[in-house]
Structure formats: structure tokens, C-alpha cells
């Protein structure tokens, strides 16, 4: 997980939620509500996802956009900005998203848990979706 100051509280809540379910959570910061720059936290998370050190990433900032844009600069990352469970499920089913980005200033903790559950409970469908994913990278 990674966030900026705007996503810090939601990140803490989701970290507790996942830990209680028995998941091992790596927290790449930030560690407080003090103003910071989201790329400083998005890049370490994206590195970990790219290297396969974690199974997937959760990226949170105020809108979800800045941290998702930064993560998506990494070739091995497919970050998806998700604000409702349906989009989160499709991000996994169709895009095999490996970073789930959420907008802390526009969703509640309960909504974020539902989005996270939808993402984690969905499976990539492969087939034509794999073909499309294979065309995303700039050669
Ligand atoms: C911080 O104020 C805000 O700009 C940031 O959290 C994010 O929304 C940027 O995309």
C-alpha cells in the first residue's frame, strides 16, 4: 500500500482491514497526514509490484489520479482508478490490474472496503483481454 497525506487515513483503515483478514501488508508510506508528494510513495509501491515482491498494490491519494498516473509510468504496472465495486471487479476481470487506486476524498471507508473486496474477489478472464493487455506497452 502507498498513499499521500490525503489517503493516509484510508490507507490505515484498509491496512487494519486486510491484516485482520490475515494478509501480510507492506506499507510504503506516507506515515501521517502531513503534506507530502504522492510520487515519493507511488514509485516504491510500483517497484515492488513490478519486481513481484508483492502480489498487488493499493494506491491512495485525494482523487486517486496522481498516485495512479505515477504508478502507471512503470512498464509492469497496470493501475486502475476505482471508485465503485463494479469498476474494481472489471479492472481485474478485463485489465488484470495489479495496482488498485482509490480516491480517498470521494469515498467512505466502507465504500473503499467494498471496492477492495470486489477487486480481490474477481479473477482475470484472459482470452481477448490478454491480447489487449499485450498491446498496452509502448515498444
Ligand atoms: C493533494 O492535495 C492532492 O492533490 C492529491 O492527494 C491527489 O488528489 C492528486 O492527484
Image (cartoon, rainbow, N blue to C red):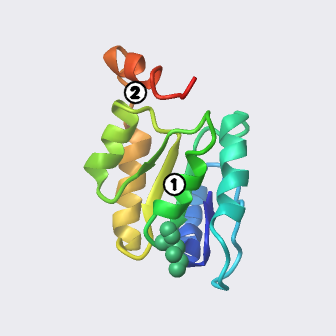
The residue positioned 66% from the left and 72% from the top of the image is 37
Side of 43 relative to 114 (left or right): right
SS label for mark 1: helix
Side of 134 relative to 34 (left or right): left
Looking at the image, residue 103 lies above or below residue 117: below
Which mark sits nearer the N-terminus, 2 or 1? 1
The residue positioned 58% from the left and 42% from the top of the image is 56
**Residue 53 sits in quarter:** top right
Looking at the image, residue 14 lies above or below residue 126: below
Tell me the quarter of the image containing the N terminus: bottom right
Could you give the CA–CA distance between mark 2 and mark 1, rounded to whole angstroms?
A: 20 Å
Q: Is mark 2 within 8 Å of ligand 1?
A: no
The residue positioned 54% from the left and 28% from the top of the image is 138
Q: Where does the image place residue 96, in percent across and percent down from the top left?
A: 44, 32
Side of 77 relative to 62 (left or right): right
The residue positioned 59% from the left and 63% from the top of the image is 15
Residue 21 visible from this viewpoint: no
Q: Where does the image place residue 102, in percent across and percent down from the top left?
A: 44, 61
Q: Residue furthest front?
A: 139
How packed mark 1 is, by other alpha carbons closer than 10 Å (few <14, some 14-19, many 20 or more), is many
The image's mark for residue 68 is 1
The image's mark for residue 124 is 2
Residue 139 visible from this viewpoint: yes
Q: Where does the image place residue 39, in percent across and percent down from the top left?
A: 66, 62
SS label for mark 2: loop
Q: Residue furthest left?
A: 86
How packed mark 2 is, by other alpha carbons closer than 10 Å (few <14, some 14-19, many 20 or more), is some
Side of 84 relative to 63 (left or right): left
Q: Residue furthest bottom?
A: 34
The image's mark for residue 132 is none
Amino acid at each position: 500500500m502507498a498513499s499521500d497525506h490525503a489517503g493516509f487515513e484510508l490507507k490505515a483503515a484498509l491496512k487494519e482491514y486486510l491484516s485482520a483478514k490475515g494478509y501480510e501488508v507492506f506499507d510504503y508510506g506516507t506515515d501521517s497526514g502531513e503534506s507530502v508528494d504522492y510520487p515519493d510513495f507511488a514509485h516504491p509501491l510500483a517497484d515492488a509490484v513490478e519486481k513481484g515482491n508483492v502480489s498487488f498494490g493499493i494506491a491512495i491519494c485525494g482523487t486517486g489520479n496522481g498516485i495512479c498516473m505515477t504508478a502507471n509510468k512503470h512498464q509492469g504496472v497496470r493501475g486502475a482508478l476505482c471508485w465503485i465495486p463494479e469498476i474494481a471487479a472489471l479492472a481485474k476481470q478485463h485489465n488484470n490490474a495489479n495496482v488498485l487506486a482509490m480516491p480517498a476524498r470521494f469515498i467512505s471507508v466502507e465504500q473503499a472496503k467494498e471496492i477492495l473486496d470486489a477487486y480481490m474477489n474477481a479473477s482475470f478472464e484472459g482470452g481477448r483481454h490478454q491480447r489487449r493487455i499485450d498491446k498496452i506497452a509502448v515498444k
